[in-house]
Image (cartoon, rainbow, N blue to C red):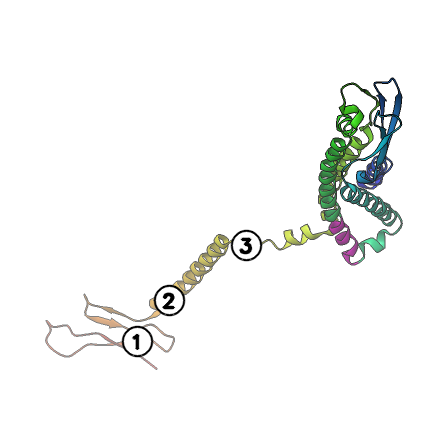
């Protein structure tokens, strides 16, 4: 909800404080012969300063010279304003969809996924454009510095003439535009997690968690041990059911079955000698 409310507002503030800017510099030149001239220099968005020119007196009668400022800073500031306008339009569109087309928005999960990707894109664009515009603004301030402009005029370089700055540009709006740019970045970047939660992708990852190699090895060892215990139990049972041979008694016993009672036969021979005992099942 905060994103829906503040994103359009901050986007408007970002491009309004930048796109509508106009700066003014006024310089008073007093020549040695007491003639005075006021020079006005105006510049504005998109800061193509190489196209800004003004006429300055040479303090040699009525002769004047035409001077130009230096620097073209249009690309960075126009990129910043473009991002601001696009973010404003998308925020309005998203607000309308959230309020009036909620069912269409959640149909087949396409709306949340698109919103998540667009949020990622605008977060990156706000960061890049704000950094570029902050650096460009520093260049604009340097190019329009009043001391640099005074050095451009031949009359002000002569020590016998007097030059005075009457008005300097006010940078408050442009500084605020840079601040609003970074504020928009934090706003969109903070909304990434909420847009991601709307997609429901985190729930699918929780339903199918990935198993680590150590867990897989532990599962394999448990399965092998269980299989061995079961097979060992069966093997011991088979050994228990088989016949046994008694060395101490010299007899051999067969396993009992349900076929009948065994009959005992003894080997004929000496009373002192004991032969093997033979059990025969009686049918």
Q: Which corner quadrant of the image does residue 252 belong to? A: bottom left
Of the two numbered discs 3 and 1 on the same chain, state the one appearing first in sequence.
3
Give the image location of residue 245, x and y in percent: 24, 70
Q: Secondary structure at mark 2?
A: helix
Crowding near the residue tagged with mark 3, few <14, some 14–19, many ≥20 C-alpha atoms within 10 Å:
few
Q: Which residue is mark 2?
A: 235
Crowding near the residue tagged with mark 1, few <14, some 14–19, many ≥20 C-alpha atoms within 10 Å:
some
Of the two numbered discs 1 and 2 on the same chain, state the one appearing first in sequence.
2
Residue under the image location 77 percent in, 50 percent down: 115
Residue under the image location 80 percent in, 38 percent down: 49
Q: Which residues are magenta?
A: 108-118
Q: Which corner quadrant of the image does residue 75 belong to? A: top right
Cβ atoms under marks 1 and 2 closer than 8 Å: no
Q: Secondary structure at mark 3?
A: loop
Q: Which corner quadrant of the image does residue 37 belong to? A: top right
Secondary structure that dominates the magenta span: helix
Q: Which residue is mark 3?
A: 211
Crowding near the residue tagged with mark 2, few <14, some 14–19, many ≥20 C-alpha atoms within 10 Å:
few
Q: Secondary structure at mark 1?
A: strand
Return the mark for residue 262.
Answer: 1
For the residues labelled 1 and 2, the Cα–Cα distance comes to: 26 Å
Find out whether residue 14 is within the magenta segment: no
């Amino acid at each position: 909800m905060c994103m829906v409310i503040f994103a359009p507002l901050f986007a408007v503030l970002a491009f309004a404080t930048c796109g509508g800017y106009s700066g003014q510099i006024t310089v008073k030149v007093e020549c040695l012969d007491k003639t005075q001239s006021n020079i006005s220099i105006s510049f504005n968005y998109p800061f193509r300063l190489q196209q800004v020119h003004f006429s300055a007196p040479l303090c040699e009668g009525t002769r004047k010279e035409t001077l130009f400022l230096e620097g073209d800073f249009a690309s960075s500031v126009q990129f910043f304003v473009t991002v601001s306008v696009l973010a404003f339009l998308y925020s309005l569109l998203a607000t309308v969809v959230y309020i009036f087309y909620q069912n269409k928005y959640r149909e087949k999960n396409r709306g949340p996924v698109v919103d998540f990707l667009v949020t990622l894109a605008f977060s990156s664009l706000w960061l890049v454009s704000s950094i570029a515009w902050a650096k460009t603004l520093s260049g604009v301030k340097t190019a329009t510095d009043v001391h640099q402009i005074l050095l451009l005029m031949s009359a002000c370089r002569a020590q016998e003439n007097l030059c005075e700055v009457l008005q300097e540009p006010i940078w408050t709006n442009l500084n605020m535009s840079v601040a609003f740019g970074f504020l928009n970045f934090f706003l969109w970047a903070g909304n990434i997690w909420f847009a991601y939660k709307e997609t429901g992708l985190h729930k699918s990852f929780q339903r199918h968690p990935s198993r680590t190699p150590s867990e897989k090895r532990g599962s394999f060892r448990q399965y092998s041990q269980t299989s061995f215990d079961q097979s060992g139990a069966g093997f011991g049972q088979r050994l228990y059911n088989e016949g046994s041979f008694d060395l101490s008694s010299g007899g051999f016993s067969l396993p009992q079955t349900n076929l009948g009672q065994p009959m005992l036969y003894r080997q004929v021979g000496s009373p002192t000698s004991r032969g093997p005992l033979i059990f025969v099942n009686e049918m």
